[in-house]
Image: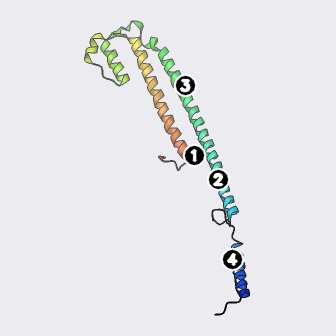
Amino acid sequence: MTLPNPYLIGAYALTGLLVLVAIAAPIKRYGDGRHADGKAEVQAKWDKSIERGRIRVEELKAAAGRVTVKTETVYVDRIKTIREKGDVIERRIPYYVSADAGDLPGGWRLLHDDAAAGTVSDTADLAHAAPVTAQAAAGAVIDNYGTCHETSQRLTSLQDWVRAQCKVNPPLEGCP
């Protein structure tokens, strides 16, 4: 049995080592084995995307804020008008309902209070119900209607705000 030439074995080994180095050298690897080729481009795209997202979020926040301020301004103006009209109407009570108009029965007051509160009194309460002056009853009715108009305006303003927010950011769920 002849032994192979040691120089030939060394030449093969050196050639194989050079081939491996030549193949592996251009491939940059992270410590965990992932390839690093294109890292800078991918990172730059990612950073630009994140920045575009931040800018868009800030634009949406600003637009939503403008909608809120506009809606609040309109709401406050309308509530002020409702209250002013209610005050004017209340000041007219003595002209429309004279002080000597007499009292309304306690049952009227009970029915009115039940209607305003959305409750039903016990019929036994009628025996203890005190009468109310016509002027006081008119004042209570005016206050109740004023509260009703304010509540109606609050709902209308909220609906307007939701519609305007949907126009600012249409993808929101629940937008009409």
Helix, strand or loop under label 1: helix
In the rendered image of this protein, does residue 25 appear above or below residue 126? below
The answer to which of marks 1 and 3 sits earlier in the sequence is 3
Q: Nearer the viewer, mark 4 or mark 3?
A: 4
Q: Are marks 4 and 2 in contact (CB under 8 Å)?
A: no
Residue drawn at 56 percent across, 29 percent down: 76
In the displayed structure, 38 sits above or below 145; it is: below
Q: Position of residue 118 (x, y in %)?
A: 35, 25
Amino acid type of the residue tagged 1 in the rendering:
Val
For the residues labelled 1 and 3, the Cα–Cα distance comes to 28 Å
| Residue, disc 3 | 80
In the rendered structure, the answer to whether residue 169 lies left or right of residue 112 reads right
Q: Nearer the N terminus, badge 4 or badge 2? A: 4
Q: Residue drawn at (42%, 17%), measured in percent from left and top?
A: 140
Label annotation for residue 168: 1
- Amino acid identity at mark 4: Leu
Q: Are marks 4 and 3 in contact (CB under 8 Å)?
A: no
Q: Amino acid at mark 3?
A: Lys
Q: Quadrant of residue 15?
A: bottom right
The kind of residue on which mark 2 rests is Ile
Residue 20, disc? 4
Work out whether mark 4 precedes mark 3 in sequence or the reverse, and give the earlier one.
4
Q: CA distance from mark 1 to mark 2?
A: 21 Å
